[in-house]
Amino acid sequence: MDGSIDPIHRIIVCTLCRDHVTGVRSGEDLCADLHSRLSAQHEPAVARGFAVEGVACMAGCSRPLTVAFQAQGKTAYLFGSIDARADVGDLVRFAKLYASLADGWCSSGQHPAGLAGKTLARIPGDPAGSSR
């Protein structure tokens, strides 16, 4: 990557989701872990290109923990049934893929294996220059 990644890329994590088994809210911990792992990447442009944020709910309550990827003009993704410990590496890998895609669009076959079956939504972005 060339270092010109726009920092409008966002990873948004639900902070209210509770694990069905443990009842633990792990969203805040996942935010911190994602931020740390992105910062530790050997590709600093990826880390600078993302903001990691927590939000109080994304209405994915039946499939907690939910995580979204979003950027202006790009397809947005919402993942559910995320395991804060087991899936963090795949979320970082998806962040790198997402940053590399001009329009954000990719097939589920391009997602890291740990995210298979966890896509809740893929929302097309506004085409550049579209008028409303």
Image (spheres, rainbow, N blue to C red):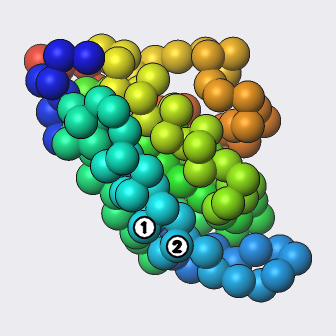
Corner quadrant of residue 109: top right
Outermost residue toward the bottom in this view: 23
Q: Position of residue 7 (x, y in %)?
A: 17, 41
Category of crowding for the residue at label 2, using alpha-carbon neighbours closer than 10 angstroms: few (below 14), some (14–19), many (at least 20): some
Q: Which mark is residue 29?
A: 2
Residue ID at (45%, 23%): 97
Determine whether label 2 and label 1 are within 8 Å by CB.
yes
Outermost residue toward the right in this view: 21
Q: Is residue 132 left or right of residue 54?
A: left
Q: Which mark is residue 57?
A: none
Q: Which mark is residue 32?
A: 1
Q: Quadrant of the N terminus?
A: top left
The amino acid sitting under disc 2 is Asp
Corner quadrant of residue 129: top left
Q: Position of residue 108 (x, y in %)?
A: 66, 21
Q: Nearer the viewer, residue 126 or 46?
A: 46
Mark 2–mark 1 Cα distance, whole angstroms, equals 5 Å
Q: Is residue 129 above or below residue 122?
A: above
Q: Position of residue 83 (x, y in %)?
A: 71, 58
Q: Is residue 86 left or right of residue 16?
A: right
Asked if residue 72 can be seen in this view, the reply is no
Q: Is residue 111 left or right of residue 30?
A: right
Q: Secondary structure at mark 1?
A: helix
The amino acid sitting under disc 1 is Ala
Residue ID at (25%, 27%): 73
Q: Is residue 132 above or below residue 34?
A: above
Q: Is residue 61 above or below residue 2?
A: below
